[in-house]
């Protein structure tokens, strides 16, 4: 794939077009001041902060989040993250199926120990979401981590059951509430060079992200 470069927006029309897709027009708000981006540096991310930022709120039990990871995230990594043009940041937001909540606690416990394992577990939840329910998710999580990572899956499952990372989980939920994001996932917030551009809901294509960020071939 030919690497792409980012240019400034030619005008307000690109953002206005996105507003009709569940977004809202640019406010020019700094990423440092946006409620959804509170404590951004502490969140799981791929790529460096300082340029463009794609900030998503995702539920590990969400089918549309899984579609976003299958269809959009790989292109975003190739076009945005790998060339060093921006960052992809995830905040967990368990609002879909009940098993998403214990899975979120397990993700936080995993992230605290190993960021690579966090991404692996998140992708595992999306790829195998049909096998999980509220009763088995922590057992299956432990089995996966024991077999596929160097982490102690049983200890992570225990941390999740005991809500050891309650503060981190609630911080993401509070950020979503403060930003008025509603009860759907994924929610994708786009920041161009540190300034808020727009918010879009659902498994959006990378073309939508590229348009908002002013991407050009």
Image (spheres, rainbow, N blue to C red):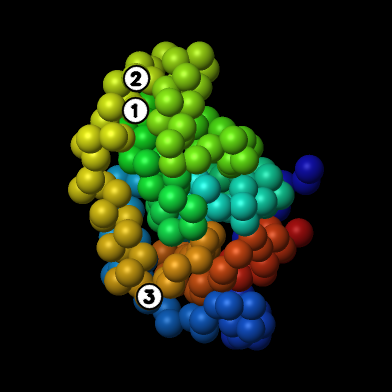
In the displayed structure, 3 sits above or below 213; it is above
Q: Is residue 137 above or below residue 32?
A: above
Element at label 2? helix
Between 148 and 35, the one lying in front of the other is 148
Q: Which residue is mark 2?
A: 154
Using the rendered image of the protein, determine whether residue 94 is visible from the camera's viewpoint: yes
- The residue lying at 71 percent from left, 49 percent from top is 71
Q: Nearer the viewer, residue 178 or 189?
A: 178
Where residue 173 appears, as percent x and y from the top left, is: 32, 59
Residue at 33%, 69% in the rendered image:
177
Mark yes or no: residue 215 visible. no
Question: Horizontal and vertical percent for residue 190?
Answer: 51, 65
Whether the residues at callouts 2 and 1 have beta carbons within 8 Å, the answer is yes
Task: Indicate the quadrant containing the C terminus: top left, top right, bottom left or bottom right.
Answer: bottom right
SS for callout 1: helix
Image point (42%, 71%), residue name? 181
User: Please, which residue is most extreme toward the front here?
Assistant: 135
Percent x, y of residue 90:
45, 50
State if disc 3 and disc 1 touch (CB < 8 Å).
Answer: no
Q: Gap in Å between the C-alphas at discs 2 and 3? A: 36 Å
What residue did someone put label 3 on?
A: 180
- Pick the quarter of the image with the N terminus: top right
Disc 3 secondary structure class = loop
Judging by the rendered image, the residue that carries numbered circle 1 is 157
Q: Give the class, few, some or many, for how many residues have Cα within 10 Å of label 1's Cα (few <14, many ≥20).
A: many
């Amino acid at each position: 794939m030919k690497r792409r470069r980012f240019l400034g927006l030619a005008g307000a029309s690109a953002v206005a077009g996105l507003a009709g897709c569940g977004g809202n027009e640019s406010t020019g708000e700094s990423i440092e001041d946006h409620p959804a981006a509170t404590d951004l540096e502490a969140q799981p991310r791929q790529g460096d902060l300082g340029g463009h930022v794609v900030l998503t709120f995702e539920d590990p039990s969400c089918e549309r989040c899984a579609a976003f990871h299958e269809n959009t995230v790989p292109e975003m990594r190739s076009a945005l993250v790998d060339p060093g043009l921006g960052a992809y940041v995830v905040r967990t937001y368990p609002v879909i199926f009940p098993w998403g909540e214990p899975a979120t606690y397990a993700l936080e416990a995993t992230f605290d120990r190993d960021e690579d394992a966090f991404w692996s577990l998140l992708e595992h939840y999306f790829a195998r979401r049909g096998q999980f329910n509220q009763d088995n998710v922590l057992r299956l999580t432990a089995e996966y981590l024991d077999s596929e990572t160097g982490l102690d899956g049983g200890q992570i499952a225990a941390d999740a059951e005991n809500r050891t990372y309650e503060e981190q989980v609630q911080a993401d939920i509070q950020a979503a509430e403060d930003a008025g994001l509603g009860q759907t996932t994924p929610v994708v917030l786009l920041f161009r060079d540190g300034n808020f551009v727009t918010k879009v809901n659902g498994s959006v294509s990378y073309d939508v992200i590229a348009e908002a960020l002013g991407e050009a071939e």
